[in-house]
Image (cartoon, grey):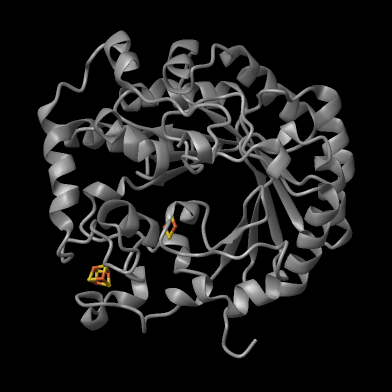
Amino acid sequence: MNGTPQPYGLLAEVTHQCPLHCVYCSNPLALLDRQDELATDDWVRVIREAAELGVVQVHFSGGEPLVRGDLETLVAECRGLGLYTNLITSGLGLTPGRADSLVSAGLNSAQLSIQGDAAESTNLVAASKRFDKKEDAARIIRESGLPLNMNVVLHRMNLSRLDAIIDVCVQWGAERLELANTQYYGWALRNRDLLMPSKAQLDEAVGVYERRKAELAERMELLWILPDYYEPYPKPCMGGWAQTALTVAPDGVVYPCPVAAEITTMEFSSVRDHDLEWIWQKSAAFEAFRGTKWMPDPCRSCSRKELDFGGCRCQAFALTGDPGRTDPVCMHSPDHHLVQDALVRANQEDAAADGDTIREKLLYRRPRTSARER
Ligand code: SF4
Ligand code: FES
């Protein structure tokens, strides 16, 4: 591989269609229509090329991947190639029959997202009243024999409910729960001032997390995804640009991460025009920020550059318009004031504004927002 790293994970975003409208959705602001999506044969070819490239795990995501009727075919292709498969789902649309057919095809695991501990929080964040369907989906996943992994995105509207959220996941039989503090891209960046928690809220939530993690150690694995705006240094996003994983969008365009479609100053290649090996090894976009040679100061001369890789390229672009700048989360970044300003606002406002007031202000991800409507 001439020194090029080998990817181990493929995020297959098979569709942008989704029954939910989450205010922190990380899909691009301009969502793709069904007619833009790769056909089954294209996805099968992508999976084969990914396996040849070294990928060992395929995560089927979206939107809601259950919308695709050919998911079983894709999962079966993975099984034939010895790849581990994971379904990332809202749970809406999951029936016992669908779960059984996916398990028969070889599905290895499922991750079910919730927005909170009750119908109100689901409705506030995702504009969906179907919290009951989430509970059904959890039961269906367990009864199908799959391990139940769960995920909840945390923000100022649900952090104070963390204990209750964990209780729900325990009751539903989750084996693993990812507590993912909001990362501010896409829709989340648009809603940042309404989603950003105060420092006091976060400190309290960290206490809850630590207490429950210890209590539940024998029963459920709890993971805390850091709220990076409050950190002194950025996250080592994706383990470095084009180092460990790739994302194929519904239309076949390939990205080094799930958010990079938002970097409008870069051109990314499609599996319709090139094979995955060429895109991974040779395309200009994948080469652009690989390693450390591209780094500007302060990263270039920083002792942490092999630890965090200068942070997140998507965040750098989202906040500065230049994906090649140091992540503004870093305390050494010349753009750090952009993050500090957001934190000052978050700590000034009343974190307990009522749901109706917030609902009027939130921007919900709209279904099929096409590039023309952007
Ligand atoms: Fe990381 Fe760059 Fe900040 Fe150093 S200066 S900590 S490498 S982001
Ligand atoms: Fe794209 Fe961090 S989300 S590099």
Q: Nearer the viewer, residue 33 or 43?
A: 33
Query: Which quadrant does ligand 2 occupy?
Result: bottom left
Quadrant of the image occupied by residue 248: bottom right
- As displayed, is residue 322 above or below residue 198? below
Q: Is residue 26 visible?
A: yes
x and y, in percent, of residue 37 in the image: 71, 45
Q: Tell me the residue at 66%/27% (across/down).
A: 91
- As displayed, is residue 170 above or below residue 181? above
Q: Tell me the residue at 32%/14% (across/down).
A: 360
Q: Nearer the viewer, residue 370 or 180?
A: 370
Q: Is residue 210 visible?
A: no
x and y, in percent, of residue 19 in the image: 61, 24
x and y, in percent, of residue 74 in the image: 82, 49
Q: Residue furthest bottom?
A: 2
Q: Nearer the viewer, residue 193 or 137?
A: 193
x and y, in percent, of residue 334 in the image: 14, 64
Quadrant where the C terminus is found in the figure: top left
Q: Tell me the residue at 32%/23% (across/down).
A: 157
Q: Residue furthest top?
A: 356
Quadrant where the N terminus is found in the figure: bottom right
